[in-house]
Amino acid sequence: MDLIVWLGFILSLVLMVLIARKNLWLGFFVGAIVLGVFNLSIVQIWQQIAKTLTTPSTLLMAFAVGIIPLIGGVLETTGMMTALVSNLNISRKLFLIFGPAFFGMLPMPGGALLSAPLVFRAGADIPNEQYAAINVWFRHALILIYPLGALLVTTKIANLNLYTAVLYMLPGFILMLILGYFFLLRGVHGKLTTKENPNLKKILLPIIVIVSAPAIHLSLMTIFPKLMTEIPLIIGVVFSFFLSLFLGKMNLKKLLPISKKMKPWKFFLIIIGMFLFINIFQASNVSRIIANIVFSRHFLLIVIGAFLGFVTGRVQMPFAIVLPIYLSTTGFSSIGYLTFATMFFAIYMGYIISPIHPCVSVSIEFFGSNLKDFFKKLYPIILISLTAATVVSLFFT
């Protein structure tokens, strides 16, 4: 019986990873159903499907996540993001750090192609593989602490406060900036060539749009602590979306092509599929079987987490896999903030350098580099980062 459970679990993961390379939400759905077939009755599977589709918090979360890429689409179409960068008057190093990082806050399909031309503006004296590494690394540095990025869903899964988790992620964010600065920006000097008279308004407007959603989310959660957290999230995201339309003087006729390009329904389905997998996993016998095996929780958090991040090119999926295993093997009913931060950071390191990660492939293609040289630029930083995470896991979690 245990062998069948293991077979179903492994098969569900394999299918999930393979399908997710082309379609993430479908990978979650197929993996969840396969796991259920090997562990639950048909009635129990339908019960978990019904539970997932009727849980208000899950539906609201999925709806909010679906709106976020539309905000990015409006900012891109109206030219607000391009205008922001063209009016900055800063050093090349700061531009290469915060230019990609700012664009990274928008979870947009192929988003690295938006920041890549801006990174290229920093000058022609940087090797192609260094360009690609800079674009990928700094683009994802700020996402590590951005409340509407991967932390939004993973803190929901772990049942943790989003903004408290952000505080625990700050050391990892600082480490990424320091390592990126010393390993990727050596030899970069001088200032960016910009307009003689920068327009402050064009700098502030897109920043206001992006910052408004988490600001409203946090404010309403503080003012109304008993309110379902997804409701302030919906309000904040919707406000940010309409603000982008207003400030960008967007023609509403362009919303349809933007929607076709950004595919918000795919983001909605990703959240639904993710929680379906979690619900079926929790209802299955897998937790009991895994709990009987002695794992090194540090190995699970760091090595397995980073490996899953690398082979899937995702963050939410590996987290949704590792967290239930961690809880079942340790016997804990919940995860602490420092353990969460360590697990998330390790997964994130694997994800950043994964060739399956779209930002990696499009950056390498745009700058005319190759995967081998790209790895040469980033693998020392990844190793140092994972070593730091291991130290934290061994001595502090």
Image (cartoon, rainbow, N blue to C red):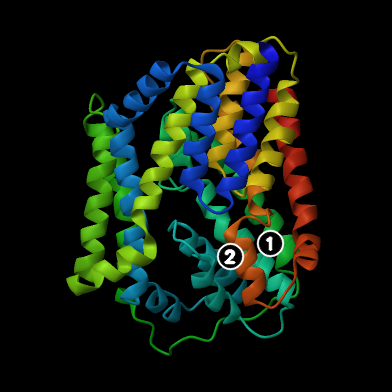
Q: Label 1 amino acid?
A: Tyr
Name which residue lies at 57% across and 34% down: 319
Compared to residue 222, the image places residue 212 above or below, namely below
Q: Which residue occupies the foreground of this view, 116 or 99?
A: 116
CB contact under 8 Å: marks 1 and 2: yes
SS at mark 1? helix
Name which residue lies at 23% across and 51% down: 238
Q: Label 2 amino acid?
A: Ile
Name which residue lies at 33% across and 65% down: 260
Q: Position of residue 212 (x, y in %)?
A: 29, 53
Compared to residue 342, the image places residue 384 above or below, namely below
Q: Which residue occupies the foreground of this view, 368 or 106?
A: 368
The residue most toward the bottom is 196
Q: Position of residue 120 (x, y in %)?
A: 60, 79
Name which residue lies at 33% across and 74% down: 77
Q: Which residue occupies the foreground of this view, 91 or 253?
A: 253
Q: Which residue is mark 2?
A: 97
Does 230 sit left or right of 76 as displayed?
left
Instruction: Give the mark, 1 or 2, whose residue is nearer the N terminus.
Output: 2
Q: The N terminus lies in which quarter of the figure?
A: top right
Q: Residues within 10 Å of mark 1 (few under 14, many from 20)?
A: some
SS at mark 2? helix
| Alpha carbons under labels 1 and 2: distance apart | 8 Å
Q: Which residue is mark 1?
A: 181
Work out whether residue 164 can be spotted: no
Q: Residues within 10 Å of mark 2 (few under 14, many from 20)?
A: many
